[in-house]
Amino acid sequence: MINYIKKPQIVLFTTIFFLGCDFKSNKLINYEYTRIEINKNTAVDSTILSFIEPYTKNLDKSIHEVVSYTPTTMHRNDGAMESTIGNLMADAIMEEVSPLFQSKTKNKIDFCLLNYGGIRDQIKKGAVTVKTAYNVMPFENSVVVLKMSGQKVKELFTYLSKYQKAHPIAGARVIISGQKINATIQGKKFDPLKSYYVATSDYLFRGGDQMVFFENPEEVHYTNYKIRSVLIDHFSKKDTLQSTLDQRLVINKIAE
Amino acid sequence: MKRRHFIKTTSASALFLGAPTFGHAVFSSKPRKHITILHTNDVHSHIDPFESDAGKKANKGGVARRAAVINKIREENPNTLLFDAGDIFQGTPYFNFYGGALELKLMSLMKYDAGTIGNHEFDNGIEGLLAPLHHAKFDLVNSNYDFSNTVMNGHTKPYKIFEKEGVKIGVFGLGVQLEGLVIKSAYKETVYIDPLEIAQDMSKLLKHEKQCDLVICLSHLGYEYTKTNQISDVKIAKNTQDIDLIIGGHTHTFLEKPTEIENAVGKTVLVNQVGCHGLYLGRVDFYLEESQKNTGEPLSI
């Protein structure tokens, strides 16, 4: 830290100072700034540390609670344009959120779209814990349900075709062959003149991953249901997690 | 231009603020007072240090360490105030499991003097903000949220005045626009009021009516937005005239040192932010000099 007294030559005069009255005041002369990094060389306050300890222990007990089991490791790169973990997540949202949405609005969620990049960890073979859900979904994003015009849904399909990533979907089956998009939603052929209820994350709704087709939907329904909570609730209901690759998104390369 | 150059070459630690026009007796024998301001922002429930595999954040942060640093500084200078600029909540399972109680208990043990409200404080709804609040032995200061028609009514302060060694320090707080950022069902009937107008009123009130020597704004507006017109700390600094320091948050901006911004009447305002997650503690040491009269005006004989 620089001692300002040793540097009297560094004086900056500003021309305006507040118009005072006749009271005793204290005038700001100068300041010093220090940014203190908190790192492993920093001393530890033992009182605080022992205060935190029981909270951590209790938390660890809950967070390491086994809620399900998986016979195989699921990760985001185990399929072509889909993955077991992605299908599991999108299916979980359909299963957990759709009944709630229906009881509130009388409408069913038609399909769900998440993003590949939002899958932050794999689910390793064996015990599945609450921590697993935190690892897969460390972000605080919640599910939103958007009523989208058929035109916007078409843009969504075009996006999938353009970026060619294993973005998780559920409730829809999309086969893309060159310019041709063949889609079914809830088992029915996609109708561009119809509107659809689409579940996604609030992150993507706000334009994450360039999913601009989510902008200005016909309706927005915030569920306030965190994706992580959806996963925990879903896992807790299943003895064994099962997810398969079922070709729900296929992008065929067309020979030129 | 010369002045601008001067600021650039002057280290942040030796800049004279608001010195009188007549450069008399700056180094007088008048008693010098030393006020230390410590601050954090966007700690986001990061209570434990980051683990060794956390990339750039590896092994950094941790409340127990921060507490040790704070205690040491308080021993050195009892005239120390500790503030937080919001987003205390959300980011680790501690929040999900304990609903913010642990964060507020720890901040109370560290003797935080005040905090402001970040958007994530609404993550468990406005009731979820009120529920753990009794654990906070410090005030939440916010001046631009009208909580009248919510459960938070009466649980925040529009401003606080601290007195240390005869120096009066006025603190007010600014919260970010909640619409579009927080679900309406979470913030309910909280009314967001234009922060710039509030900042102008509050700083005037604190500096002139309440005769505070230092005016500090705890802001969760965000440091600066270059692509939009959104109100920011930089804009607040430029368009007000009585703020000395803005302690910011929200944008997780890691500033190495406070940005010096010229305010509406040419005085310097410090705008600072220490990133997020408790990786850093900001420390501003203010030096003041007692004066019987305002020396900014020539003495009339």
Image (cartoon, coloured by chain):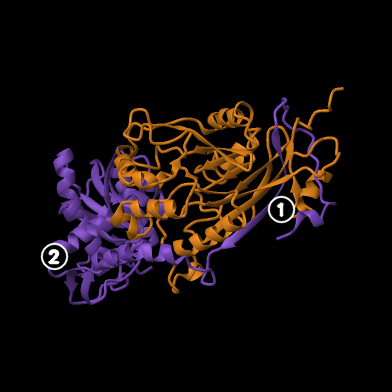
Chain colours: A purple, B orange
Task: From the viewer's perspective, tell me whether residue B215 is left or right of residue A213.
Answer: right
Report x, y in % for residue A192: 26, 44
**Does B213 sit above or below residue A227?**
above
Element carrying mark 1 = loop
Q: Quadrant of residue B290?
A: top right
Task: From the viewer's perspective, tell me whether residue A21 is left or right of residue B122.
Answer: right
- Chain bearing tag 2 is A
Pick the quarter of the image with the C terminus of chain B.
top right
Residue A63 is marked as: none
Element carrying mark 2 = loop
Viewer-proximal residue among B292 and A183: B292
**Residue at the image point whose x is 79% and y is 54% from the top:** A5
**Which residue, given by chain and number where applicable, does mark 1 sit on?**
B12
Dot in front, 2 or 1: 1
Residue A238 is marked as: 2
Report x, y in % for residue A217: 32, 40
